[in-house]
Image (spheres, rainbow, N blue to C red):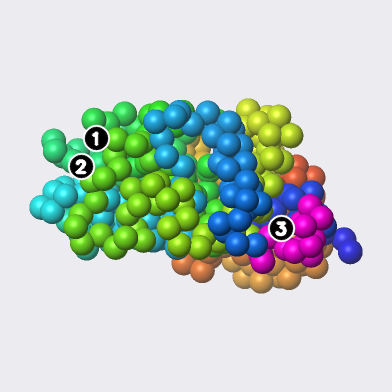
Amino acid sequence: MTRLYNFCAGPAALPESVLETARDDMLNWHGRGLSVMEMSHRSTEFVGIAEQAEASLRSLLAIPDDYAVLFLQGGASLQFSAVPLNLLPEGGCADYLNTGQWSKKAIAEGKRFGTVNVAASAESNNFSTIPPRDSWQLSADAAYFHYTPNETIGGVEFHWVPEVAAPLVADMSSTILSRPVDVSRFGVIYAGAQKNIGPAGLTLVIVRRELLGRSRAACPVMLDWKTAAENDSMYNTPPTFALYLAGLVFAWLQELGGLSVMAEINRRKAEKLYAAIDGSSFYANPVELPSRSQMNVPFTLADANLDKLFLQQSNAAGLLNLSGHRSVGGMRASLYNAVPEAAVDALIAFMQDFEQRNG
């Protein structure tokens, strides 16, 4: 069977070699006569899988020893609640930056648990840029500062790490593992798995250990990071198969040469696609140049009446999931780690041909 090129924003493409390994292991993992999905999470075999996954992730991101690595459930959206429940004291205040739809959802959830100061917002610019640093209105006593380094819907991305006094909390769902990052600059990093880590169902939290144990008395035990850390992410049954697949993805990245190599590949992919868009009067990208995302590239056609035809023909050409988010329309190509450079080349060739036939 021929594999097609998948540009889905999530659940996203997985490396083909990872899928092949999972296929070969499906019925008989390492000759043990059962699938990973059938193992006890307390078994020696699965504990070894989990420990190797964490070790590989720590190596890839150079995670310091004073950070806990948690493999949880509920998606990044559940962490919108877990962050204030773990870090925001009763009557306290937290700073949030609003750069898109995922920021807005995090802000709305944060307001359920305390005072949220929106330090800056790009909503008036239709989320086409990052608010300038000198425009931010920060609180003097913020318990933490929350931001979304990459907004998958609008295609807006930070290419720098904010300098703030409060612990920095980042929803890195769509950029983690796409390039090196200095973990030590963050208090908390969290990410849903279904972009660059693995399949949906797994959530990663990397938290500085000194921030553990600050949860509210009313914090549900399943959302308490300290409980998760003390139980090696196994207070209850973890998403075992998703964690196993994530470990395979981490190993794939290590074999590739690590995140510096992955970053160069991702840079090339994004530069190629943006050059094709900018070099055409038929296509356009709405995001200002310094704020463009490497992971999610939205674009529009000069004539929106051609959108449906573009999607029909691109799908027939083996270029899948190019429809923009339902809230903004247009097109979107997500260029996560497992999307090969050949996929971008094929997309550009199709776009150029489509323009010639319909421009």
Q: Which residue is mark 3?
A: 6
C-beta proximity under 8 Å, tags 2 and 1: yes
Q: Which residue lies at the image location 34% right of the left edge and 58% below the top edge? A: 223
Q: Which residue is mark 1?
A: 166
Which part of the image, by quadrant, shows the N terminus?
A: bottom right
Instruction: Measure the alpha-carbon separation of dots 3 and 2.
Output: 40 Å
Secondary structure under tag 2 reads loop
Q: Which residue lies at the image location 62% right of the left edge and 41% below the top edge? A: 52
Magenta-drawn segment: 26-38
**Residue type at tag 3:** Asn
Instruction: Measure the alpha-carbon separation of dots 1 and 3.
Output: 39 Å
- State whether residue 290 is above or below residue 77: above
Q: Which residue lies at the image location 62% right of the left edge and 70% below the top edge? A: 305
Depth-wise, is mark 1 or mark 3 nearer the camera? 1
Residue 69 position within the rendered picture, expressed as x and y whole percent measured from the top left: 46, 42
Secondary structure under tag 1 reads loop
Q: Which residue is mark 2?
A: 143
Residue closest to the eye, 39 or 335 = 39
Secondary structure under tag 3 reads strand
